[in-house]
Image (cartoon, coloured by chain):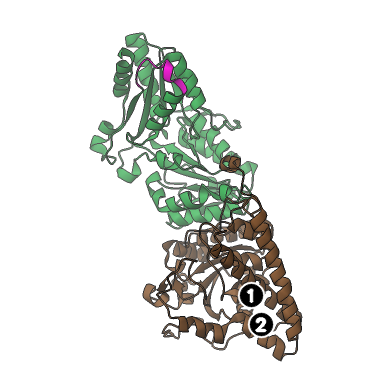
Amino acid sequence: MNASTSSNKSAGRGRRASKPAVYEASPEELLKFYRDMLLVRRFEEKAGQMYGMGLIGGFCHLYIGQEAVCVGVQSALKDGDAVITGYREHGHMMAAGCDPKGVMAELTGRSGGCSRGKGGSMHMFDPAKGFYGGHGIVGAQVSLGTGLAFAAKYKKTDNVAVAYFGDGAANQGQVYESFNMARLWNLPVIYLIENNQYAMGTSVARASSEIELYRRGESFKIPGKQVDGMNVLAVRAAMDEAVAHCRAGKGPMILEMKTYRYRGHSMSDPAKYRTKDEVQKMRAERDPIEQLRELLLDGGHTDEAALKEMDKEVKALVADAAAFATESPEPDAAELYTDVLA
Amino acid sequence: MSDERTMVEALNLALREEMDRDDNVMVLGEDVGADGGIFRVTKGLIDDFGESRVMDTPLAEAGIVGVSVGMALAGLNPVAEMQFSGFSYFAFHQIEGHVARMRWRSRGRFTLPLVIRMPFGGGVRALEHHSESREAYFAHTPGLRTVIPSGPRNACTLLKAAIRSPDPVIFLEPKAAYRAFREEVPEGLDPAQLDKADIRRKGADITMISYGAMLRRTLEAAETLAEEDGVEAEVIDLPTLAPLDAETIGASVRRTGRAVVVTEAPLSFGPAGEIAARIAEEAFVYLEAPVNRVTGWDVPMPFFAREQSYLPDARRITNAARVTLAY
């Protein structure tokens, strides 16, 4: 059940799921999960192409391989819940229902971008969808997410905040300042660790004294759980538990999603830290979209033709976004002086 | 009851009135609750507004500012306290990385109505981090307003304005002025207008520009010049250091032809250098003498025995003015 490829000696303590909980999804939900994951993947494939064509400036961090996490997480949330994440955020935005055109055009730095070409790949926002960014400094968004949860509690709502971060960010000091405050004040925040095994090129085992990241909250009395992040149903089940925990006023929870990114850290990754075989094996055996595809076909919920049709439709959506992102004009030079101060 | 208040009391009044006005205004920081803040600025607020609006935080400056950013994103109006400006360096990456840029990078869809209060500056026999003046770090950062009161009355009205500002404000409180003198600060004052320099003394012979605790020393020097030299100095206070009101400064120097800038901050690459450059731009052909800078020295803030050797005093300011006048 473990998605890790590093030698992962389980400590056997904490709250690791003994048998993985899996969400009981209806056929309609399964199809929606599939489509949402497909959109993330096709979007990212197109973004990768456009980067290769020189249309995308700055950096570009693709989410391919991790789709089950953002789709499973988002499906467990309701209106008014808040999501905040780091720089690998295109997937989260697709899952949150943000307009692919606005996201792609932000990658190309155009005026039609969701930050009008001023934010770039790491700084995109969509308040209407509860998406609070897109942040470039590793780990610094974790305390912001804690503040979002504070506001939810202060305003006496039952909303939760999800603060995503990666295995690399899990070693930033500020994460632990946030853990302490969140538990001290019982804030409704889910610390969602996307452990894709590598902080750029440094594996978890080479960077972390405790590699079971879900246990990082133990000394703050924050319960944690390790989840198969390649299985959207496992992600959803864990989220349901965490969301219920938060909405019930029991304070924060940590979910460690064991996941894997197929592509490099960014588009300019020499990939000397892992073998091609490792990546191939993961793709062949653990791919989140393929797993769900098998489930859908085996369960007789759909057929090849329908899935092909869906893929066509998703690709068209992405192609539209790419066309928009190519044609949208660059921001006016006058934008240099807007939005600095009110 | 008398309306004469110290700066500490005036700040407390501003917080109280703003919290009364708007439930979204809340304060957080180390010891701001039960203890009433390290300098007692938040004294008694916890009794009147409760623990949910007056939050004692763990000792974690980066977390305090980071959490405040999240609160502000979600529509609250947090007023965070750093115990000393020197402790804000722990939070500097949040200030530089998020506080100053959220509006810009979200093309104005998010704005951070957040105030970070910090006592700063020397004159209280503290050491290094507890006494230094690093306002240039904040003033240099686009997207922040850097506000510095010089007395109780403008402390009250500026803090109100800072809290109501949709932009993040770094609010630097000169410790030396916290309890040094009182001013008339009645309840219900209107907020000050930010971004405006304040002409505190009219004069035609020389312009003296300062802010924070140095303003009083500058005014003192101006009085000495009037008494001993028959020189009338115009004294300008910069309650908003950044963005700088270069227009008011320029207009004054065009009238007087001479300028002295006084700051506690060290000389090199500091606020005085920026102000001098703006004077050169605004009033070059009117200048009768080079702009003179009276500042702290380019050294770490010394311990209390030598503190007054570091800080500009009225004598140094007066001498600098005389040199400028004699040029």
The relative height of residue B315 versus residue B75 in the rendered view (above or below) is: above
Give coordinates of residue A123: x percent, y percent: 56, 56
The region drawn magenta spans B282-290
Q: Nearer the viewer, residue A189 or A65?
A: A65
Q: CA distance from mark 2 to mark 1?
A: 10 Å
Side of A193 relative to B75 (left or right): left
Place residue A251 in its image quadrant: bottom right
Q: Nearer the viewer, residue B76 or A36?
A: A36
Side of B155 relative to A9 (left or right): right
Amino acid, disc 2: Tyr
Q: Which residue is mark 2?
A: A23
Locate the C terminus of chain A and report the quarter of the image it occupies.
top right
Q: Residue at x 66, y 71 (%)?
A: A39
Check residue B146 for magenta coloring: no
User: Quick one: SS at disc 2?
Assistant: loop
User: Quick one: SS at disc 1?
Assistant: helix
State the hue of chain A. brown
Place residue B128 in its image quadrant: top left
Amino acid, disc 1: Gly
Give coordinates of residue A160: x percent, y percent: 63, 65
Outermost residue, left direction?
B305
Q: Residue at x 58, y 86 (%)?
A: A20
